[in-house]
Amino acid sequence: MRKILSIVLGIVLLLGAIFISKKFIDNNKKPKPKFEKIVKKVFVDTVKNKDIPIIITTSGNLSAKHKIEIFAEVQGVLKPSAKEFKAGTLYKRGESILRINSDEFYANLQSQKSNFYNTITSIIPDIRLDYPNEYQKWQSYLNSFDINQSTPKLPEFSTEQEKYFISGRGINTAYYNVKNLEVKLSKYSLRAPYNGVLTEGLVTPGTLVRVGQKLGEFIDPSVYEMEVSVNAEFADLLKKGNTVHLHNLEKTKDYKGKVIRINGKVDAISQTIKAFVQVSHKDLKEGMYLEANLTAKTEKNAIEVSRKLLIDNKQLFVVRDSVLDLIDVNPVYFSSESAVINGIENGTLLLSKLVPGAYDGMQVKIFQDKK
C-alpha cells in the first residue's frame, strides 16, 4: 500500500512539474515586434550641362609697377627743398624731390667751361688763315657760347685736315670733359619722373650724403603688379591677357586685373610657374595682400559640384526610381571646394547634400520643397 502511494505521489509531482514548465514556456513566447521601414528624404539637383569657367585660385602681394630706389651718385650735403623728403610726400612729374649742395662742383664746371672757351678763342685766328671756309661756323659757335648755359655741340668737320687740326689742339678732349661735368652736375638734383609718392625717406636736410648711399624709394601709386604662383600642371591654361578677379581677405572689396607676363621657367622645388597680374584702383596700396581668381579656360558641357559629394574623387550618388545609384564620373578640374565634371547626362537627379550612411541601392525619397 505504501509502495502504491509513493508511485501515485511521484506521478502527481511529475505532472505538476510538466504543467508548471509548460506555463513558463507559454509565458515566454512573445510576438515579434514589427518595425516600420524608414525611407530617408534626400535633396537633389537636376543636371543641366553648361560652359563652366576653370578658375585657378592663388594669392600674392601688390608691388608698384613703376618704382625707383633712390641712390646717391654724388657726394654732398642734402639741401632743404619745397617739400619734406619724408615717406608719404606726393610729387608731380618734373617736381624737385631732393637737392644736394653742388656749389663747389659748379665752380669747377664753370672753370672748365672758361678754359674750353679760351681754347676755342685761341684757334680762331689760325682757322681764319688756314681754313677760311670754316671760319664762319667756328666764329658763330663762339658767339653762341654762353658759360651759364649747357655747352652747345661742336660744329661738324668738313675736311680731314680740319678734323686733325681741331683734335690736335685738344678741342675734342676739352669739350667732352665739360659735357661729362655737366652730366654729373645734373645728378646733384633729382626730379620726379612721374606723378608719385615717396614711400621711404632715409635722409634729412643737412645730412652728408655719400656716393652709393640709399636715400629712399619712389613709386607710381596708380598701377600695381602682383606676382602669383600657379601649379605647373596648369601652365598650358595660362594665357597673356586672361582676366583676373581679385579680392581682399575679407572679400569685401573686388578688383579686376589681367595677366601681363608669364615666366617661361618652372620652379624646380615647388613645381610652380610665376604669372604677373596688373591691376589699378585708387584703394590699392603697395604691399597689400590679395587673393586672385584666374580664369584659365572654359570647360564645355560640364557641371560644378561640391567636392564633399565626391566618393574617392571619382564617383557620385544619383537617384533613379527612388533608389541611390553610385556612378563613375570624370572630374576635369579640382579647386579647394568644388570640382568640375563632364559626361553626366542632362536631367540626371544628382544628390546635392550628403546622406549619412548612404550606399548603392539604398531606397530614398526626394524632398519636395513646399513654398
Image (tube, rainbow, N blue to C red):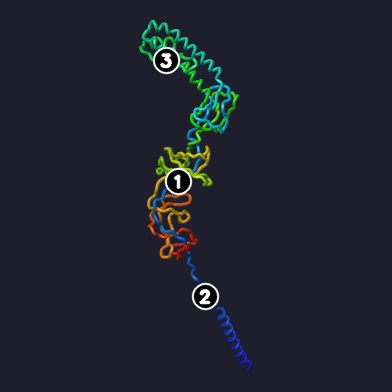
Where residue 35 appears, x then y in whole percent?
A: 51, 72
Q: What residue is pinned by disc 2? A: 32
Type of amino acid at the residue the image marks with label 3: Leu
Q: CA distance from mark 3 to mark 1?
A: 61 Å
Where residue 274 appears, x then y in whole percent?
A: 45, 39
Type of amino acid at the residue the image marks with label 2: Lys
Position above or below: 65 against 184: below
Position above or below: 217 against 105: below
Q: CA distance from mark 2 to mark 1?
A: 60 Å
Q: CA distance from mark 3 to mark 2?
A: 120 Å
Q: Nearer the viewer, residue 35 or 267?
A: 35
The answer to which quarter of the image holds residue 211 is: top right
Q: What residue is pinned by disc 3? A: 154
Q: Does any portion of residue 267 appear in the rendered image? A: no
Farthest residue toward the top?
129
Type of amino acid at the residue the image marks with label 1: Ile
Q: Dot 3, crowdedness within 10 Å: few (<14), some or many (≥20)?
A: few
Say which element carries label 1.
strand
Q: Dot 1, crowdedness within 10 Å: few (<14), some or many (≥20)?
A: many
Q: Nearer the viewer, residue 183 or 97?
A: 97
Question: Is residue 117 rendered to the left or right of residue 129?
Answer: right
Q: What residue is pinned by disc 1? A: 56
Say which element carries label 2.
loop
Q: Nearer the viewer, residue 73 or 135?
A: 135
In contact (CB < 8 Å): disc 2 and disc 1: no
Farthest residue toward the right?
2
Residue at (47% x, 39% y) in the render: 279
